Image (cartoon, rainbow, N blue to C red):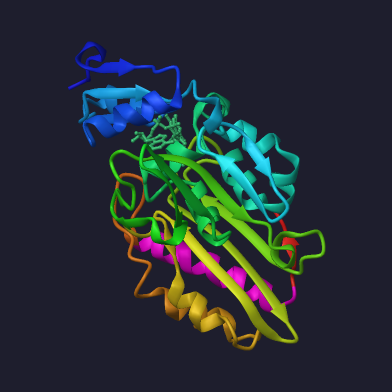
């Protein structure tokens, strides 16, 4: 049954401190709402569990992209449109730009936020695979202070995460390793979203990958998927078999074999487990083959 707006209570504090106090007064009872593009769908579907909400959209401290010497910080309220429009971010972290460009359509891109995409914790979300591959860190903020969690450790099970009920996600930190994302990088970066259509489709499978080969050896290999497990998945087994090994014709087979225990998709309304496993393997093989063949850069 459709949810009713008047069954819910929304507070809009003018300061971030007030918002943090509200979240910590009654931990777990009050939930943040940012762009609302996931929350409103749950409301319409009648599955919105929480009654009390705190609006965070007005907190400009949580908005924008900060470029530092060694890192770029994408604050939680940054929208997909803002990610797409940012020069340095799009140049150095093109997989994130592409994930933003392929999320929803313009209305969603103007309102949906990076923070909401991460904390909503859908295994089918589009920015998480890119953030896993870029080795992002999350900044979590509460009235108790701030802490940093490697994104690779954040999702612990389906819709489970290392976030305390009184914590806001305040930003995502991306390391600007010149070797990987600088102008002289020899890395191959790849992002592929496979859905029913080219636009306005939730992923059936989504891949982000980054690799570097030096003197015939794989020295960096990072591979992540959306929609193939209960969480956005960093394929650590495939990464382990690839790094340190020869970048030769056998790389694709070795990587594909290592997916077996980790890529465990489900059948659902969007696709079948069989299709997803096959597509994930094909995408991983294609990336490994291109890497072994000496391709570098980012090709859409
Ligand atoms: C038509 C449509 C198309 C879509 N297409 C895509 C798509 O292609 N790819 C994709 O990945 N997603 C898609 N989405 C889902 C959604 O737009 C994204 O997940 C978006 O990034 C959510 O951000 P938001 O700010 O709107 O989150 P909200 O709806 O405000 O919040 C989502 C969840 O995150 C929590 N939250 C939000 N911000 C914070 C924070 N800073 N700290 C702590 N908790 C927080 C909220 O409590 C809530 O549980 C689509 C949605 C719609 C309606």
Q: Residue at x 48, y 76 (%)?
A: 238
Q: Residue at x 37, y 37 (%)?
A: 143
Q: In which quarter of the image is residue 144?
A: top left
212 above or below 248? above
37 above or below 74? above
Q: Looking at the picture, how far across and down is residue 111, in whole percent?
A: 51, 26
Residue closest to the eye, 123 or 282 = 123
* Number of marks present in the image shown: 0
Q: Main secondary structure of the magenta part?
A: helix
Residue 229 on the magenta segment = no
Q: Looking at the picture, how far across and down is residue 232, in whole percent?
A: 41, 56
User: Which portion, as a residue range, is magenta?
Assistant: 274-294
* Residue 41 appears in the rendering: no
Residue 280 on the magenta segment = yes
239 above or below 145? below
Q: In which quarter of the image is residue 175?
A: bottom right
Q: Residue at x 63, y 32 (%)?
A: 82
Residue closest to the eye, 258 or 249 = 258
Looking at the image, the residue that sits furthest to the left is 1
Q: Tell me: 110 left or right of 231.
A: right
Q: Tell me: 227 left or right of 8.
A: right
- Dividing the image into four quarters, tell me where ligand 1 lies: top left
Q: Quadrant of the N terminus?
A: top left
Q: Looking at the picture, how far across and down is residue 181, in whole percent?
A: 71, 60
* Residue 270 appears in the rendering: yes
């Amino acid at each position: 049954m459709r949810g009713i707006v008047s069954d819910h209570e929304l507070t809009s504090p003018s300061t971030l401190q007030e918002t943090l106090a509200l979240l910590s007064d009654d931990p777990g009872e009050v939930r943040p709402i940012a762009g609302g593009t996931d929350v409103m769908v749950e409301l319409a579907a009648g599955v919105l569990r929480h009654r009390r909400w705190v609006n965070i959209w007005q907190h400009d401290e949580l908005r924008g992209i900060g470029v530092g010497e060694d890192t770029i910080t994408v604050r939680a309220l940054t929208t997909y449109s803002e990610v797409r429009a940012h020069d340095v971010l799009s140049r150095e972290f093109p997989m994130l730009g592409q994930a933003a460009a392929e999320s929803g359509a313009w209305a969603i891109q103007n309102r949906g936020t990076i923070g909401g995409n991460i904390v909503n914790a859908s295994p089918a979300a589009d920015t998480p695979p890119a953030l896993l591959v870029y080795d992002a860190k999350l900044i979590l903020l509460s009235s108790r202070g701030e802490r940093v969690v490697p994104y690779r450790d954040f999702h612990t099970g389906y819709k489970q995460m290392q976030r305390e009920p009184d914590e806001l996600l305040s930003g995502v930190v991306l390391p600007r390793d010149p070797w990987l994302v600088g102008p002289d990088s020899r890395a191959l970066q790849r992002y592929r979203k496979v859905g029913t259509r080219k636009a306005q489709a939730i992923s059936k499978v989504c891949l982000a990958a980054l690799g570097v080969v030096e003197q015939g050896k794989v020295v960096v290999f990072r591979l992540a998927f959306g929609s193939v497990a209960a969480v956005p998945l960093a394929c650590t087994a495939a990464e382990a078999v690839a790094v340190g090994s020869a970048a030769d014709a056998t790389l694709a087979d070795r990587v594909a074999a290592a997916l077996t225990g980790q890529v465990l998709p489900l059948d659902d309304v969007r696709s079948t487990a069989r299709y997803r496993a096959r597509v994930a393997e094909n995408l991983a093989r294609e990336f490994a083959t291109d890497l072994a063949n000496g391709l570098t850069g980012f090709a859409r």
